[in-house]
Image: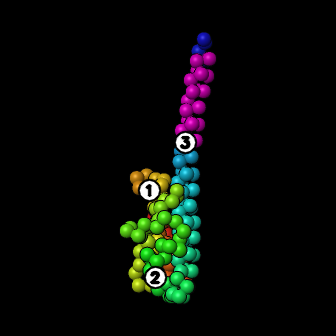
C-alpha cells in the first residue's frame, strides 16, 4: 500500500470514530429530553386527577376542597405506595406532599439529567383553591 492509501484509511477510521461518538452523544441527550418531557406530562396528568379529587364532594369519594394524599392515591389508577406517598411507572417515580392548600409533586426520571450525575427531576406545585399549577425543571 502506498502512503496515500494508508492516509486515506487512517482518515476514514478517524471520521467514522468521530461520527459514532457524536451519534451516541446526541442519542443520550435526546433520551434525557424525552424522559424529562415524560415526567412533566405524567405530573400534569396527576395534577388533573388530583384537582378532580379536590373538587369532588366527600359523599362521592372526593376530597371536598381538601387534600388527602392517601385517599387520592386510589384515584390515580396506578400502584400507589401509601408508605412513601409515591407512584412509580416506566418514566420515573413521583412523590406527593402537602402543605396547607398546596399539593407538591416531585418527579424523578430514569435518565441522567443535565448535571451528569443525578437523574432528571421536575417539581409541580398545585394550589387547591385557585387551581394554579407551577412546574419547575430542577435537572
Look at mark 1 in the image and give the residue it sits on: 119
Q: Quadrant of residue 3?
A: top right
Position in image of residue 133 (x %, y %) = 53, 77
Q: Are marks 3 and 1 in contact (CB under 8 Å)?
A: no
Please rate how many residues cluster around mark 2, counting C-alpha atoms within 10 Å: few if below 14, some from 14 to 19, many from 20: many
Q: SS at mark 1?
A: strand
Q: Provide the major secondary structure of the magenta segment.
A: helix
User: Is residue 77 placed above or below 100 in the rendered structure?
Assistant: above
**Mark closest to the chain's N terminus, 3 or 1:** 3
In this rendering, the count of numbered labels is 3
User: Is residue 47 placed above or below 115 in the rendered structure?
Assistant: below
Q: SS at mark 2?
A: loop
Look at mark 3 in the image and give the residue it sits on: 24
How far is disc 3 from disc 1 in space, using C-alphas? 18 Å
**Mark closest to the chain's N terminus, 1 or 2:** 2
Q: SS at mark 3?
A: helix
**Mark closest to the chain's N terminus, 3 or 2:** 3
Look at mark 2 in the image and give the residue it sits on: 67
Amino acid at each position: 500500500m502506498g502512503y496515500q492509501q494508508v492516509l486515506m484509511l487512517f482518515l476514514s477510521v478517524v471520521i467514522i470514530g468521530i461520527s459514532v461518538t457524536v451519534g451516541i452523544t446526541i442519542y443520550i441527550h435526546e433520551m434525557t429530553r424525552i424522559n424529562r418531557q415524560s415526567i412533566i406530562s405524567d405530573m400534569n396528568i396527576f395534577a388533573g386527577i388530583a384537582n378532580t379529587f379536590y373538587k369532588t364532594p366527600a359523599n362521592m369519594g372526593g376530597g371536598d376542597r381538601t387534600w388527602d394524599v392517601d385517599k387520592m392515591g386510589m384515584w390515580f389508577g396506578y400502584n400507589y405506595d401509601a408508605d412513601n406517598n409515591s407512584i412509580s411507572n416506566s418514566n420515573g417515580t413521583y412523590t406527593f406532599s402537602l402543605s396547607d392548600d398546596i399539593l407538591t409533586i416531585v418527579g424523578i426520571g430514569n435518565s441522567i439529567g443535565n448535571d451528569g450525575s443525578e437523574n432528571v427531576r421536575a417539581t409541580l406545585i398545585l394550589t387547591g383553591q385557585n387551581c394554579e399549577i407551577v412546574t419547575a425543571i430542577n435537572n
